[in-house]
Image (cartoon, helix red, strand yellow):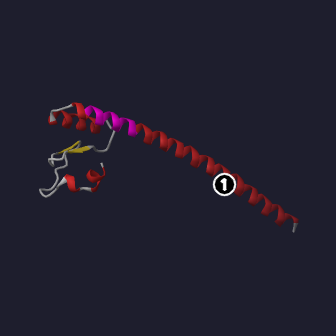
């Protein structure tokens, strides 16, 4: 009986230690994710400011392609109110693709 109690106590202690360790690791991962997210947000803000200062659509397209090629993003796209759209990858949208009707455009 004493051995069973010791085993149960040991299991409870292990569970508490594991739970605390898991919480610590989870918190560290959350911090890493928040740092990653803040970095991406800063880059996106800087890109937006740069794009505003560029008047040539071809220059914006070159920048989008470069950002994807450099590995900063899997893809980047810019849509304008006249339905002009630029992608950082070679994807060609279907003929009926209207960027200003997309949810991400409306939320921007």
Decide whether residue 74 is among the magenta residues. no
Residue at the location (16% across, 50% down)?
A: 92
Q: Nearer the viewer, residue 33 or 90?
A: 33
Residue 19, placed above or below residue 36 = below
Residue 95, placed above or below residue 48 = below
Residue at the location (20% across, 52% down)?
A: 100
Q: Is residue 30 left or right of residue 60?
A: right
Residue at the location (75% across, 56% down)?
A: 13
What is the crowding at mark 1: few (fewer than 14 residues within 10 Å), some, or many (at least 20)?
A: few
Residue occupied by mark 1? 19
Q: Nearer the viewer, residue 14 or 85?
A: 85
Q: Is residue 83 left or right of residue 15?
A: left
Q: In the image as oriented, which residue stretches furthest toward the bottom?
A: 1
Measuring from the top left, give residue 68's x and y in whole percent. Answer: 28, 39
Q: Where are the magenta residues, as a range?
A: 40-50
Measuring from the top left, give residue 45's x and y in whole percent. Answer: 34, 36
Quadrant in the picture for residue 73? top left
SS class of the residue under badge 1? helix
Residue at the location (67% across, 53% down)?
A: 18
- Quarter of the image with the N terminus is bottom right
């Amino acid at each position: 009986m004493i051995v069973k109690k010791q085993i149960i106590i040991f299991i409870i202690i292990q569970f508490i230690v594991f739970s605390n360790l898991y919480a610590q690791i989870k918190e560290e991962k959350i911090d890493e994710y928040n740092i990653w997210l803040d970095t991406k947000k800063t880059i996106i803000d800087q890109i937006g400011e740069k794009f505003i200062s560029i008047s040539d659509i071809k220059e914006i397209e070159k920048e989008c392609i470069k950002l994807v090629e450099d590995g900063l993003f899997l893809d980047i796209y810019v849509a304008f109110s006249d339905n002009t759209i630029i992608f950082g990858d070679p994807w060609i949208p279907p003929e009926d693709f209207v960027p200003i009707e997309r949810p991400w455009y409306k939320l921007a």
